Amino acid sequence: MREPIFRQSIYWCPECNVPLIASTCGCGTKGEELSLLKPYDVRPALSHDRTLIQELLNKRFGIEHLPDIILFNKTGGLDRNDLIIINGERFGWLTFDPLTRDYSIEITSEGLAMVLDQVTCGIADITEEVKSGGKRRIGGKKIPFECDLPDGPVLLKSGSLYGTGIYHNGTLRIKKIGRVDVRHWKNPSWEDAIRCNKPHLKNLERHAIRFIKHHRQDRPTCNVSFSGGKDSTVVYELARRAGVTASYFVDTGMEFPETIQFVREMKIPVILKGPDFSKGLEEHGLPKKDSRWCCEYLKLEPVSKWLHTRGPCVTVQGNRWYESFARSALPGAVENPFNPQQLNISPIRAWRALEVFLYIWWRELPVNPLYDQGLERVGCWMCPAMLEAETEIARTNLPDNYAKWDRELKKYAGKEGMTEDALRCGLWRWENLPPKMLELISKHNIKIKAKK
Ligand code: SF4
Ligand SMILES: [Zn+2]
């Protein structure tokens, strides 16, 4: 079967003002291409995130109204760092700082044209500074500036020109300033977006079902690995439509209660249980992003045991290329190296999170409520692969679990000689710190190892 292509952009219908997962809208109009940023995954802003953006924009700039369709393109950074896409343009950035534990929002110059007529505060008037600078170009410059604006992103005004900048401690870094023509766009709903993408969704579904049917006979039995997340919800549906009804879920014992409840509601017939996490912790120490003994211990082992009683099988799983760089080379069908009896097939490997949600909404599938609470991925509630922004949500939702977990973290970090400062910004999550984190600790002079 022909391998799907890896895409680095999405399209936007200029007529309907909706995102498109292929180049032409259901209305027949050719979409305008919008380049994405690595790892090129794009997803809808759901309820928690919409409220978050709305509150940040309101507090900082007095902006009150946002359109219904907002997308995030996750990108690299210290922690959560999402490019916000609105009206087919780069509207701004939503960033979580693992040190201050706070979000900030920045508007791009394209974004300004969407909201300038709503802005009531957060503007630094630099008309005089620009005048006194004569004809010199001011974009990209840092100027001393006294004002009572809080530190962070600001909007700039110079006569009739507007722009964006960052204010910090009496200094203003001017990003860009120029003429801004305020525009007004249609405000379609997600239902409109589903309608405009329906031909493409049908195509995706047809290909995925054909792919499952093609591989299901490769082994005597076929099942779905259901994790409780959005991707496995989609493959569960696709597999059902391809005639596969067997499924299993592995309960790591560290699942969010919402996930367990969701699995119950989905009536997944086989629930496998791994060994106790705390025993693994004693044996291996803290699980790390770059050393995840927990996956093998909590998930792969119980599946292996179960499969040994059943013999070879094909397993439909929801892994996607765009989830991470590590998965970007994932083949359509591959033997599980841990358990060669199992042939794992990934029918939605070429879907972005946008396709996943559009499909869920189109087919009216139930979805784990954790996404609406602000989590981007669903796994164990203390997973080292979570962003610190997500950990904050988990900590608020599960205060008792986190009180215990924080004690464990302190204990194990103490054994590893890690300081409380390093622990607080989540540095326990790496065995070997990546360059961006090394930069963070050197910039803020964070000590990692406690003195003996
Ligand atoms: S979800 Fe996270 S914590 Fe849970 S087993 Fe996988 S890597 Fe480990
Ligand atoms: Zn259209």
Image (cartoon, rainbow, N blue to C red):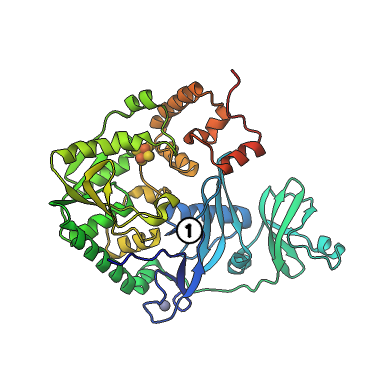
Work out whether residue 34 or residue 268 is closer to the camera in this orientation and state it: 34
Q: Residue at x 31, y 74 (%)?
A: 199
Residue 292: percent from the left, percent from the top? 39, 36
Tell me the kind of residue under disc 1. Answer: Phe
Instruction: Note whether 318 is above or below 293 in the view shown.
Output: below
The quadrant in which the N terminus is found is: bottom left
Residue 380 in view, yes or no? no
State which quadrant residue 181 falls in. bottom right
Residue 77: percent from the left, percent from the top? 55, 48
Residue at the limit of the structure toward the bottom, as seen here: 28
Work out whether residue 136 or residue 51 is closer to the camera in this orientation and state it: 136
The answer to whether 421 appears left or right of 324 in the picture is right
Q: Residue at x 38, y 27 (%)?
A: 284
Residue 387 in view, yes or no? yes
Please name the residue that numbered disc 1 is placed on: 72
Instruction: Note whether 305 is above or below 43 in the view shown.
Output: above
SS label for mark 1: strand
Q: Residue at x 43, y 71 (%)?
A: 188
The answer to whether 367 appears left or right of 131 in the picture is left
State which quadrant residue 208 falls in. bottom left
Disc 1 Cβ-to-ligand 1 distance below 8 Å: no
The answer to whether 288 appears left or right of 299 in the picture is right
Number of numbered callouts drawn: 1
The quadrant in which the C terminus is found is: top right
Instruction: Note whether 294 is above or below 153 in the view shown.
Output: above
The answer to whether 125 appears left or right of 283 in the picture is right
Residue 265: percent from the left, percent from the top? 22, 48
Question: For ligand 2, which image quadrant applies?
Answer: bottom left
Residue 382: percent from the left, percent from the top? 40, 36
